Image (tube, rainbow, N blue to C red):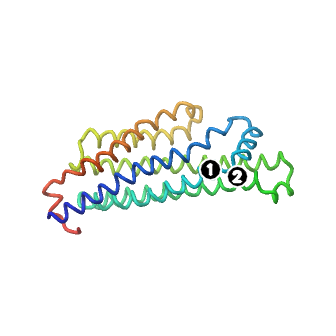
């Protein structure tokens, strides 16, 4: 039992570290968005061309985030498997679909940069055509992001529910996870149906950020409190 508890705390610390590092890399990956000018394709294209290295660093940071997410999903599954293996596995499926969607979005980012910075494409199309294709690629990235965040919300909701049932962490923190995850998943779906809410919804991501940072710090500093009925289960 002591060895099992030690393993569970090890998985919790891996998950905590993954939460915090992924949050940092995702912030770096978000930096290039400041150069995107809504409604001004020419200015946006000029900004991307002038700041190509920054955009490439952002892309690399996003890819690193998704790699870390895989480690996070793995650690959460092992941590929550003794509590409810079926629900933990369902959460894994949701989160892996999310990660796949977001990773595909990075491909669209790379296509955008290649269209705008490669002499090959500038020799094949006029400037307006290049800008139009780049805009389509950027729209594809945004769509992948939206779909991915629906599955993020679903997966995180299930993980948070199992955490609530586990007794590993304070109930208020697990409850915040359920609320913020549902807000992200259902809110993103709402924006797909009602695009006019798009300007308001960025505020909906705030609670999710608070939850992930809070849970990451809790896992790293406090670890998990393991009830006897969980610690006695096999498989570790």
Residue at figure coordinates x 68%, y 35% from the top left: 38
Q: Quadrant of residue 1?
A: bottom left
Please report the residue visible at 37 percent of the width from the left and 43 percent of the height from the top.
Answer: 213
Mark 2 and 1 residues: CB-CB less than 8 Å, in contact?
A: yes
Indicate left or right for 134 with 157 as reference: right
x, y percent for residue 155: 40, 52
Q: Residue at x 36, y 39 (%)?
A: 179
What residue does disc 2 label? 112
**Mark 2 residue crowding within 10 angstroms, few (<14) / some (14–19) / many (20+):** many
- Say which of marks 2 and 1 sits in front: 2
Q: CA distance from mark 2 to mark 1?
A: 9 Å
From this viewpoint, which residue is outermost toward the bottom?
235
Q: Which residue is mark 1?
A: 141
- As rendered, which of 139 and 107 lies closer to the eye? 107
The image quarter in which residue 76 lies: bottom left
Q: What's the residue at 30%, 50% (across, down)?
A: 220
Q: In terms of sequence position, does the residue under pointer 2 or pointer 1 come before the other?
A: 2
- Residue 194 occupies quadrant: top right
Residue 38 falls left or right of residue 7: right
């Amino acid at each position: 039992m002591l060895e099992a508890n030690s393993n569970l705390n090890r998985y919790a610390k891996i998950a905590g570290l993954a939460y915090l590092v992924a949050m940092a890399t995702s912030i770096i990956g978000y930096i290039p968005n400041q150069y995107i000018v809504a409604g001004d394709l020419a200015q946006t294209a000029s900004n991307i061309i002038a700041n190509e290295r920054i955009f490439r660093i952002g892309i690399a940071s996003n890819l690193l985030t998704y790699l870390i997410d895989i480690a996070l999903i793995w650690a959460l599954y092992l941590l929550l498997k003794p509590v409810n293996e079926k629900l933990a596995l369902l959460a894994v499926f949701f989160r892996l679909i999310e990660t796949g969607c977001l990773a595909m979005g990075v491909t669209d980012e790379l296509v955008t940069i290649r269209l705008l910075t490669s002499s090959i494409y500038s020799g094949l199309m006029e400037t307006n055509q290049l800008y139009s294709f780049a805009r389509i690629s950027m729209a594809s990235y945004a769509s992948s992001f939206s779909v991915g965040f629906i599955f993020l919300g679903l997966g995180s909701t299930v993980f948070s529910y199992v955490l609530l049932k586990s007794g590993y962490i304070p109930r208020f923190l697990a409850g915040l996870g359920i609320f913020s995850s549902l807000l992200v998943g259902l809110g993103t779906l709402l924006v797909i149906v009602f695009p006019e809410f798009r300007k308001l919804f960025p505020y909906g991501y705030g609670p999710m950020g608070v939850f992930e940072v809070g849970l990451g710090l809790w896992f790293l500093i406090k670890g998990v409190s393991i009830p006897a009925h969980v610690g006695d289960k096999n498989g570790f």
